[in-house]
Image (spheres, grey):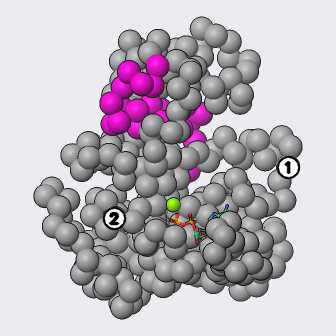
Amino acid sequence: MRRYKKSPTAGPRADCVGEAAVRTDWDMENQRSEKRAEIMAAPALIEARNLRKSFQAGAGVFVETGRRVRAVDDVSLALAPGETLAIVGESGCGKTTLARMLLRLIEPDAGEICFQGRDLLAAGGAELRALRREMQMVFQDPFASLNPRLRVEAIVGEPLEIHEPHLGRAKRRGRVRATLETVGLGADAMQKYPHEFSGGQRQRIGIARALALRPKLVVADEPVSALDVSVGAQILELLQALQREFALTYLLISHSLPVVAQLATRVAVMQAGRFVEVGEADQVLSRPAHPYTQALLAAVPEVPGLALP
Ligand SMILES: Nc1ncnc2c1ncn2[C@@H]1O[C@H](COP(=O)(O)OP(=O)(O)O)[C@@H](O)[C@H]1O
Ligand SMILES: [Mg+2]
């Protein structure tokens, strides 16, 4: 089984750029080994070491106070440029918490994150803003994640307004139009409001918003779980096409193995805040090593058009 290379020490920030993962014999034997080897040899786009986050339990009346939930418990990972790492696991296992830490939307209790060779957790001000624009998120719920009071032009243009204020209105409008086109929406979408679109179209708008700044890393947190299977499959195909077109690196979060099977190059299986198995997608999905992964796979219902390997 492939494992991420452990950093020798938690050491100096200068050694931020590491190899994305260790090469194995399995890699070399694989048909796609050349491409994989290329990916693996590249410095990681993002590398996290020993991330931890716990929350105070007890928002509910019946939970004893003072107990802490370890949402993410010593997780390390690295993403090579251009790959799709899927994180799969049951609801509540810590996927969203991990994703939010990687984008520094919440602060880890412990651990390190290097993004593009920079210490993300130490960055502030202009440096942090510059790093942030390279990492964007696609959210689960295309109904809740778009401001209902804004027209699509404003929704997709907002990140540009913030990060590229010098663009000016006409150029911004051009960028919004072009970005909408890449996700399969016409210019007529610009003047409409989110409620005028179907779920799948709204998710396209959410993807356009994430892509407007031309980021390197896209974290998609359950991007199709709020959609019908057939609509979700189209969105997954779109994500795949966009990855090729813009050389994107994906962190795909999903509780659904068929979804993961469609997109992932590597899979990390998460249980109770920890990674229990990490490996090439084919390997994890067809020859799972960990009993928890085996149980997840055994529980997958057959979904037409989304066959596991
Ligand atoms: N802001 C928060 N406050 C308290 N507990 C939280 C918070 N966010 C997440 N949790 C808890 O952390 C655990 C992991 O949650 P989450 O990361 O949302 O899991 P997943 O995305 O895999 O469903 C859960 O037990 C959840 O209740
Ligand atoms: Mg979640």
Give the structural element (helix, strand or loop) at label 1.
loop
Report the Cα–Cα distance between label 1 and label 2. 36 Å
Residue 18 visible from this viewpoint? no
29 or 141: nearer the eye? 141
Image spot of residue 278 (x, y percent): 45, 79
In the depicted structure, whether residue 149 falls above or below residue 44: above
Image disc number at residue 103: none
Q: Is residue 177 left or right of residue 70?
A: left
Magenta extent: 193-217
Image disc number at residue 124: 1
Q: Amino acid at mark 1?
A: Gly
In the depicted structure, whether residue 116 falls above or below residue 170: below
195 part of magenta stretch:
yes
- Residue occupying image coordinates x 63% and y 57%: 100
Image spot of residue 282 (x, y percent): 29, 74
- Residue occupying image coordinates x 76% and y 84%: 9
Residue 209 visible from this viewpoint? yes
Q: Amino acid at mark 2?
A: Ser
**So how many labels did they put on this image?**
2
Can you name the residue that lies furthest to the left here? Answer: 304
The quadrant the C terminus occupies is bottom left
- Residue occupying image coordinates x 69% and y 73%: 57
